[in-house]
């Protein structure tokens, strides 16, 4: 028999408080952890490294347009399911889940507004919605943006970001490449400028159509831009690809892109180029000044006093 009885104590370990999901974001270039709120206040650009995260469509429009001037068009336009596509998840389910997550009906927001006092037709692609893939609705919104410029003689700006065509819509998705390009042809005939802004990533069918047809093509730093992926190209050509292949800097050196502009400078740079294209801010009409002439009042001649006799 043991001299001392065994006593067991129960230790309760308090679970460590976990950091809420989405509270911090990891910078892909510097591998540093960035506070999400700080990132949002800096237009989703890492202050130290300058890495540009994708910017949601509503925030992009707010950063570019004059306050209170933007009027969204076709906000309720949404995609159908013409092929009755089904897989791990049906196309209808994917549309519903992404719409709930982003608050958008599809991957493109379009409308009209003022930029530095200059009226523009603008479309912005939102990568959060199915990778900003181009389906029938996205192509239609882009086309209507261009047609508004044709009909109203206003410059067109499209902020591009896409993984390519939307496979759930098959050939209907690929048809948008021809439709948007034809609309830009009509815009060019009227000599109305179109500025394309390429963000990370701009790939495949979007890059092979309206994204590469701008009178002026701007890009954000480090944006991935191309048609097929680098791995596919390497396997097809059986050659090593040069360093920086398919980046904005690589394409700038080879003449495809006109300028690389940081996100914080994009609005001012666009206003500058619009002014160069001849779309100056309309001066406010001033009321004509009315000059009031002072009338000369003739004084009556003073009466002479009669001399008393």
Image (cartoon, helix red, strand yellow):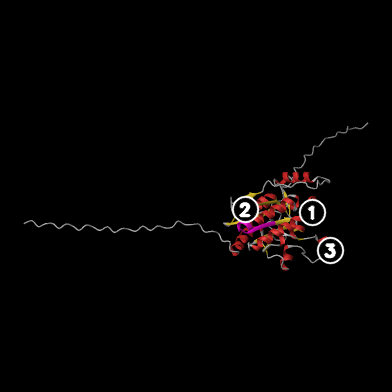
**Which label is found at residue 95?**
none
What secondary structure is found at the residue carrying circle 1?
Answer: helix
Label 3 neighbourhood size at 10 Å, few (<14), some (14-19), many (20+)?
few
What secondary structure is found at the residue carrying circle 2?
Answer: strand
**Residue holding disc 2:** 112
Can you give x and y, in whole percent of width and height, for residue 33 in the image? Answer: 73, 53
User: Distance from label 2 to label 3 (Cα)?
Assistant: 42 Å
Count of numbered circles in the view? 3
Can you give x and y, in whole percent of width and height, for residue 302 in the image? Answer: 18, 57
The residue at 76%/58% (across/down) is 205
Label 2 neighbourhood size at 10 Å, few (<14), some (14-19), many (20+)?
many
Tags 1 and 3 in contact by the CB under 8 Å rule? no
Of all residues shown, which one is farthest toward the right? 1
Q: Earlier in the sequence, mark 2 or mark 3?
A: 2
- The region drawn magenta spans 150-159
Image vertical order of residue 39 relative to residue 218, above or below: above
The residue at 64%/55% (across/down) is 148
Can you give x and y, in whole percent of width and height, for residue 146 in the image? Answer: 66, 57
Image vertical order of residue 307 relative to residue 85, above or below: below
Q: Earlier in the sequence, mark 2 or mark 1?
A: 2
**Residue holding disc 3:** 234
């Amino acid at each position: 028999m043991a001299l001392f009885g065994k006593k067991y104590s129960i230790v309760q370990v308090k679970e460590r408080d976990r950091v809420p999901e989405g509270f911090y974001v990891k910078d892909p270039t510097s591998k540093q952890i960035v506070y999400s709120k700080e990132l949002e206040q800096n237009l989703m650009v890492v202050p130290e490294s300058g890495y540009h995260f994708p910017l949601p469509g509503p925030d992009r429009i707010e950063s570019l347009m004059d306050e209170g001037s933007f009027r969204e068009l076709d906000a309720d336009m949404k995609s159908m399911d013409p092929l009755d596509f089904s897989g791990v998840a049906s196309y209808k389910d994917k549309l519903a889940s992404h719409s709930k997550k982003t608050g958008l009906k599809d991957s493109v927001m379009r409308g009209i507004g003022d930029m530095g006092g200059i009226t523009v037709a603008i479309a912005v692609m939102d990568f959060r919605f199915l990778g900003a893939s181009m389906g029938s609705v996205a192509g239609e919104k882009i086309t209507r943006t261009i047609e508004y410029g044709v009909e109203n003689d206003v410059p067109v700006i499209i902020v591009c970001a896409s993984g390519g065509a939307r496979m759930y819509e098959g050939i209907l998705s690929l048809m948008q490449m021809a439709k948007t390009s034809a609309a830009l042809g009509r815009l060019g005939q009227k000599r109305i400028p179109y500025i394309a802004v390429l963000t990370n990533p701009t790939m495949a069918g979007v890059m092979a159509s309206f994204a590469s047809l701008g009178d002026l093509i701007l890009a954000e730093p480090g944006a991935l831009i191309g048609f097929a992926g680098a791995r596919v190209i390497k396997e097809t050509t059986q050659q090593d690809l040069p360093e920086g292949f398919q980046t904005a800097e690589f394409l700038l050196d080879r003449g495809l892109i006109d300028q690389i502009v940081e996100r914080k400078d994009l609005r001012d740079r666009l206003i500058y180029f619009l002014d160069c294209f001849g779309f100056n801010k309309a001066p406010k009409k001033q009321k004509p000044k009315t000059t009031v002439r002072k009338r000369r009042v003739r004084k009556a001649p003073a009466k002479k006093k009669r001399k008393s006799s």
